[in-house]
Image (spheres, helix red, strand yellow):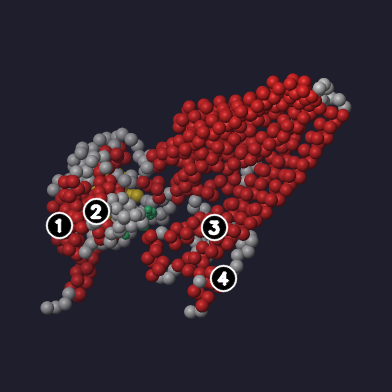
Amino acid sequence: MSARTNTPEAEDTSQHDTPKEGDAQTGTPDPLFGSGIRYTMGWARHEGDRTAGFGRMMRRLPELVGICLKLSWRADRNALIIVTACQLLVGAATAGGLLATNSVLQQLLTAGPTPDRITAALPALALVGISAIAIAVMTAWSNAMSGRLKPKVERLAYTELLARSARVELLHFQRADFHDLLDAAQYGAGWIDLVIEQLIKTVTAVMGIIAAAGVLGVLHPLLLPLLPLSVVPRGWAAIRATRMRNESRLTWLSHMRQQASLTSLLTSKDPAEEIRAHAAGNFLLSHYDRLATHSALEQARLARADAKADLVAGALSGLTTAATYVLLGWLLATGRMALAAAGTAVLAIRTGTNQLGSVVSSLAYMHEYGLYTADWRDACRQAQELAIPEGGTVTPATGPERIEVRDLRFSYVNADKPALNGVNLTIRRGEVVALVGHNGSGKTTLAKLLTGLYLPEEGSVTWDGVDTAHLDRDRAFNSVALLSQGFERWPFTVRSNVAIGRHQTDPTAEALTRAAASAGAADLIEELKDGWDTLLASEFQGGINLSGGQWQRIALTRAYFRDAPLLVLDEPTAALDPRAEAATFTGVRALAGGRTVVLITHRLHSVQHADRILVLQDGVITENGTHQELLELAGEYAELWALQASQYNADTPTP
Ligand SMILES: Nc1ncnc2c1ncn2[C@@H]1O[C@H](COP(=O)(O)OP(=O)(O)OP(=O)(O)O)[C@@H](O)[C@H]1O
């Protein structure tokens, strides 16, 4: 190995061409990610809107303001009222201050002894001071109130989104477009405080403009058109700069996500093991650096584009300022305006143009962030439409007496063939039913339909004659305990990991211990340093991690702790040692009394004592019977059984 490969930096340049500006083009497949990652995130939902002009921006504005005001009203109406009142008062004080300034100038510029002129100007001077104090007080109060309002609005937006998405039918979580919307909506919820901030800035600036325009109108009507005229170039440049920024951002957005995914891979717990064992660190790092270089080049280009736009804006703005002073000079020279009024006009024009510039940039920011606010609203609406309905037929607490499946067909979104293709089956209360079959044959999918987690696409699944779609699903789920293949390893204490399975009631020590004993986890928990209070997350202070099998026992404890009449165990022993596995299956039989158990496993020796074994093949039940009946049938099950048995026999040394 050459010395160069000792540092990741050395490896970078040897592996990839040095990125050049313009390399990062949309649609160019990435050597690591292909082109798949680019459009999978909510970011890219607004390509058209992001590069839209002023007209489109203004058309969306009322809707956006409406969303923000409604949310703010719900979050903290007092704060909203105070902020609005403060802004109105700031506007009034600005106008009053300008008029008072005019009066001061008039008094100072009239003929007469200086002390007299100063004395005459004093009341107006006091008014200038009072309006400045009023502006400062109102601005401070408004800032304090908006500081109170914004986090409340953000919290409300997040809570609403999370509450609604937590109720969405499971199937929609398989849809990429729904995830795109949720992604964007999360930005919307997080950035809603920025939209409100810009909205407040806009209101402040509009008040300033009204004040300045009012004063200019009083001083000389000819001065009024100067105000919008002077801001046109700055507004045009600001919008142009925003569009350029957005176009540029779209170019490197996917890089940002790819970079973020590499950052997360290099710093997360789970991939750490394989990265080290396969020495993949430098490889990932070199790709990270390649992407970071692209991003830096794009940002440099962006900065230059911004600078150019600013330059053009500055030049045009200078021209309009010059025109303003020429007009003022002409008004003065021709005696159409007094010197004092001209002085006030300069102040009013400066105030007005500054505020107009501020309005334009606030509107541009509002438009940009506001696209996500609209997504937040759309996601909340969609989540509501796709939610598991509330109410329906209530099932008895003892669970269904009979689950019937008739001509059941079910396909996942974008799947080219159905996962279940005409399943018929009846399960009675208290039965232990085992589902076996090759990978992808539909066992897990069937279990999810039996429990009402998914609804049939065709055919029916009924609980005591009631279609699962018409059940009160919240109550129905209450009757279900599920240990799924990818069970959750909650980063909580052991107690919470188990009690989350039935969190509505305070877990009694006795119920926890009983569940742990049934799952074979009692000794394991007792030996942990803080017992039930041990934190199962080594990435947090004081936390520890468990082995795969130990985690499986905790997950099994959780399922047992739910103490539900319908128990679904999907590969419950995949990570268990043989003794624990045997104990688990014996435990399942013992537990069954009155409880319906659906057991999915590839360990055929463990299912031989099930009441019934169902063999699935390509989404269809091909065999249905007891272990003995299926062996006699000499079909798929018998073949798989013989295969597994032969492996054991071959490996067993003859005594
Ligand atoms: N979320 C999903 N989206 C799309 N297709 C899916 C999804 N989950 C499963 N499938 C497909 O549905 C079919 C049935 O999958 P299922 O998980 O029910 O099989 P299984 O019998 O439980 O497999 P295994 O023994 O590997 O756990 C497979 O073809 C699988 O690829």
Asked whether, in this view, residue 1 is left or right of residue 590, the answer is right
Q: Which of 429 and 326 is in front in this view?
A: 326
State if disc 1 and disc 3 touch (CB < 8 Å).
no
N-terminal label among 2 and 1: 2
Report the mark closest to the observer, 2 or 4. Answer: 2
N-terminal label among 2 and 3: 3
Classify mark 3: helix, strand or loop.
Answer: helix
Mark 2 residue type: Asp
Please give the name of the residue rendered at 51% of the width and 69% of the height, measured from the top-left corner: 8
Please give the name of the residue rendered at 58% of the width and 61% of the height, measured from the top-left corner: 294
Disc marking residue 530: 2
Disc marking residue 586: 1
Q: Position of residue 636 (x, y in %)?
A: 24, 63
**C-alpha separation, residue under disc 4 versus residue under disc 3:** 18 Å
Report the mark closest to the observer, 2 or 3. Answer: 2
Q: Where is residue 329 in the image (x, y as percent from the top left)?
A: 84, 32
Q: In which quarter of the image is residue 142?
A: top right
Residue at the left extreme, as displayed: 655
Please give the name of the residue rendered at 50% of the width and 61% of the height, measured from the top-left corner: 33
Classify mark 2: helix, strand or loop.
Answer: loop
Disc marking residue 255: 3
Q: Where is residue 484 in the image (x, y as percent from the top left)?
A: 29, 53
Mark 4 residue type: Thr
Quarter holding the C terminus? bottom left
Q: Which of 582 and 285 is in front in this view?
A: 285
Mark 1 residue type: Thr
